[in-house]
Amino acid sequence: MPQNARITVAKTTLAIPSICFGTTALGDMPDTYGYGVDEARARATLNAIFDNEIGFIDTSRNYGAGRSEARIGAAIAERGGLPKGFIISSKLDRNMETNLFDGDRAKASLDESLKALGVDSIPLLHLHDPEYASSLGDVTKKGGALDVLFRMKEQGLAQAVGLAAGRVDVMMQLLRDYPFDAIISHNRFTLLNRNGAEMVEFAKARGIAVINAAPYASGILAKGAAVQPLFAYQPADDTVVSRVKAIEALCSQHGVPVGAAALQFSMRSPLIASTICGVSTPDRVQQTIDWANFTIPDALWKDLAELPFDMDDPEAKRVYKPN
């Protein structure tokens, strides 16, 4: 599928490209990625995103304590508005100091996002990280964050609404009970880990668009085990490094960049509607497009299919530092 082809999210009017550019790192989050991103670098990267044909970006209220959305909003304003047809995906977030995530907090989160981005609505709007809420009951109760999310769609503040989270058990609990249009899962459907595979199949069967984030497993499959030994935002252990080196060896034999194989593993799956690729420099934007278009022989896919992968939660031991 061409990277700019669009898939209509079921039961909505929203059609999304098969690639989305993630902007977590553009919020300047060195505790997560091991490096910082200053304002100038973020602006140059955002301009590269807005200048290409993909037209799809993902952010969140809490990325970099609001810096991601603020920088996106500033870039939009500088350009005189969003390019025609460009889609923003963002997320409702809990109060990051108290972890409160009730209906009032959801409303405040959207208001903050609209102001920061300088837009009147957000085409694809998700409930974000409910597993970190002080009480999941605040999220699910009548008038809680989830009720407010679906009301935002009814009010035209979003064309489609989704669930973006980490823990599969929490996501499954909510997916069974609520009519989401989309989900975002990260680090759990990659060459290295399939912890989210059953959930992805469940969502697909329900007609929910699956957006797969972090196909590079937070860097190690893009920059290599020797350069970026981070797996799921943590130092990669010996087992992970060994498996990455095995992938690198196979890709080298077939003359394929590891990043291209990691990205297309997600893109070629019939379960995945779109893949979110985080970028933090302008050249990474074009590299993503090049990797999406790279011709990969069937023989490599057969070889990769024989390698082991994990099914455990890759972030079970993660020390979460959102800002």
Image (cartoon, rainbow, N blue to C red):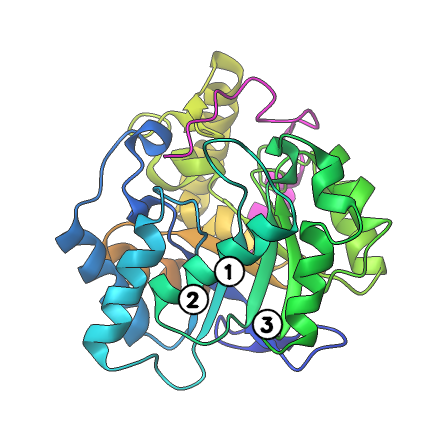
Where disc 1 sits, the SS reads helix
**Which image quadrant is residue 14 in?**
bottom right
Q: Residue 319: horizontal and vertical position, in percent?
A: 48, 20
Q: Do the residues labelled 3 and 1 touch (CB within 8 Å)?
A: no
Q: How far apart are marks 3 and 1 (CA)?
A: 10 Å
- Circle number at residue 110: 1
Q: Distance between the residues labelled 2 and 3?
A: 11 Å
**Which image quadrant is residue 208 in?**
bottom right
Specify the principal SS of the magenta part: loop
Q: In the drawing, does residue 204 fall left or right of residue 17?
A: right
**Quadrant of the frame with the N terminus:** bottom right
Q: Are marks 2 and 3 in contact (CB under 8 Å)?
A: no
**Quadrant of the frame with the C terminus:** top left
Q: Do the residues labelled 2 and 1 touch (CB within 8 Å)?
A: yes
Q: In the drawing, does residue 131 fall left or right of residue 27?
A: right
Which residue lies at the image location 37% right of the left edge and 53% below the top edge?
Answer: 23
Specify the amino acid type for callout 1. Leu
Q: Residue 293: horizontal and vertical position, in percent?
A: 44, 66
Q: Residue 12: horizontal and vertical position, in percent?
A: 70, 78
Whichever of labels 3 and 1 marks the residue nearer the N terminus, that label is 1
Q: Mark 3 points at which residue?
A: 158
- Circle number at residue 114: 2
Q: Is residue 21 magenta?
A: no
Residue located farthest toward the top when viewing the structure as drawn: 238
Up-down relation of residue 95 to residue 315 (above or below): below
Q: What stretch is highlighted in magenta?
A: 295-323
Which residue lies at the image location 65% right of the left edge and 64% below the top edge?
Answer: 161
Q: Distance between the residues labelled 2 and 1?
A: 6 Å
Q: Residue 129: horizontal and vertical position, in percent?
A: 59, 40
